Amino acid sequence: MSPTTRHLNGTPPPSGHVPVDEFSPLPLLVLAMVTVSSKALAGLCWALTTTWSLWGSSKAPRICTNWGESPSPHLGDHDWDNWHSMRDPAVVPSFVLDYAPFVWLYSDELFMPGKMTEHLKHTVPYLYYDPIITSHANLTTLNDFNQYGDGLHVYLTSEDDPSEPPLPRWLTGSHNTPITTFPGAEDEETNDGRSSAPAIIIWVEKGPEIVDAFYFYFYSFNLGNTVAGWRFGNHVGDWEHNAIRFINGVPTSMHFSEHSGGAAYTFPAVSKIGDRPVSFSAIGTHANYATPGIHYYAIPFHLLADHTNRGHLWDIKKNNLVFHYNLTADVLTADNRNKDFPVEWFHYEGRWGDRRYPESDKRQYGGIAGQYAWVSGPQGPKSKNLGRTTICIHEEACDVKESIWLDEVWDGEWEVKEWGKDLVGVQIEGVEL
């Protein structure tokens, strides 16, 4: 089967077809743009891009491309010393929740969303490979461990062997599978898509007009992908996210985290359910993509691939914890909706899982193109460049695409369903790693 570029509804665009609006004010736009100042030009581009989306187009005018997603493309233009937010940090702006993403978890996903509190009950803080204490940390005391090894070398190490099936429920998150209701069920409207594991929403102000909202998804285990029967990239603890940039309350662009990087799109370009954007979570790795299908990464020659499809719909708006982060003061404030939830955990600088197993460990193998079977767990949300000036986590190479069609995806979804279980080695007695 050969690769093809597909729209989300499954219908590929006709060969050579580029969507064009029936009404195109481009000639007038060009005339106007050459007569206005650079800042006015940026504002006009942003306004017109928003208007374009109302006409149903995911393409911004080409002349506006270099101006990115914002009428203030460089956040450094703001006078930060003299700017003070008028917003109440304990009250989330309504648009942050109104545009909260839906997440399609893979149909054969074995590692569902997790809870930080449950994760901490089954892990012990280690400095490298040695326990700091023999008991558990909690959300309030977690950042106290920053004093050890400059904080960056502390690892929440699993009390259970993650290579030994069957894996316990806290690692698989099976009890947190989003609820799927059926027609006629009394709670269909209120519970469909709800997981008992909350998403973490953090909104950050970048000036008087700009708010970045980060939607974090925590999982207690990340199952790596296979190359020639060898599995690479397993780790305890997993933090993924989407980020949406709002200009005056209007969503303009969206980032999808993928492993150590990710992709970004203009907001009109991404797929939606109603007005809310959709993210596709890859089986095992939970990397986020804008489309279903097969996505290659990390190793050349398409040897490693993520797989996404429409499996379990997770509606993070149904269960979440919301916080405001003040960049300049380095203060996290819990929203009034969850005002008693601790905030100290956010400042923990260590890892949320085991340290990469040494090569002397019988469970470890690899070192191929920097890939190992067992790698270190990730740092938490604070490490994800919340102060980014562009919507991308890596600002120096931020390409905000105007269409999800620009990414070539192998739409082998039917094939993935056939051999999906082979990807994770499902067996009666548990998970074979």
Image: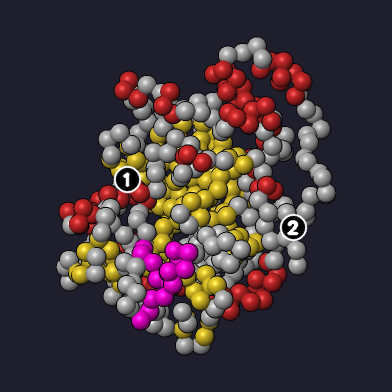
Residue at (71% x, 19% y) in the render: 30
In front: label 1 or label 2:
2
Front-most of residues 248 and 106: 106
Q: Is residue 254 left or right of residue 341?
A: right
Main secondary structure of the magenta stretch: loop
Q: What residue range appears in magenta?
A: 362-377
Kind of residue at badge 2? Thr
Is residue 84 shown above or below 113? above
For residue 276, the mark is none
Q: Can see residue 168? A: no
Q: Is residue 286 left or right of residue 202?
A: right
Q: Kindly identify which residue carries mark 1.
A: 334
Q: Residues within 10 Å of mark 2 (few under 14, many from 20)?
A: some
Place of residue 36 in the rendered image (x, y in percent of width and height, measured from the top left): 61, 13
Place of residue 105 in the rendered image (x, y in percent of width and height, measured from the top left): 55, 63
Q: Is residue 416 left or right of residue 386?
A: right
Is residue 245 shown above or below 424? above
Q: Residues within 10 Å of mark 1 (few under 14, many from 20)?
A: many
Residue at (74% x, 57% y) in the render: 4
Q: Quadrant of the N terminus?
A: bottom right
Is residue 203 shown above or below 65? below
Query: Do the residues bearing badges 1 and 2 touch, measured as CB atoms within 8 Å?
Result: no
Of callouts 1 and 2, the N-terminal one:
2
Q: Kindly identify which residue carries mark 2.
A: 4
Place of residue 307 in the rendered image (x, y in percent of width and height, measured from the top left): 59, 65
- Assign a secondary structure to mark 1: strand
Residue 14 shown in magenta: no
Q: Can see residue 11? A: yes
Kind of residue at badge 1? Ala
Front-most of residues 29 and 191: 29
Mark 1 vs mark 2, CA separation in Å = 45 Å
Q: Number of numbered discs present?
A: 2
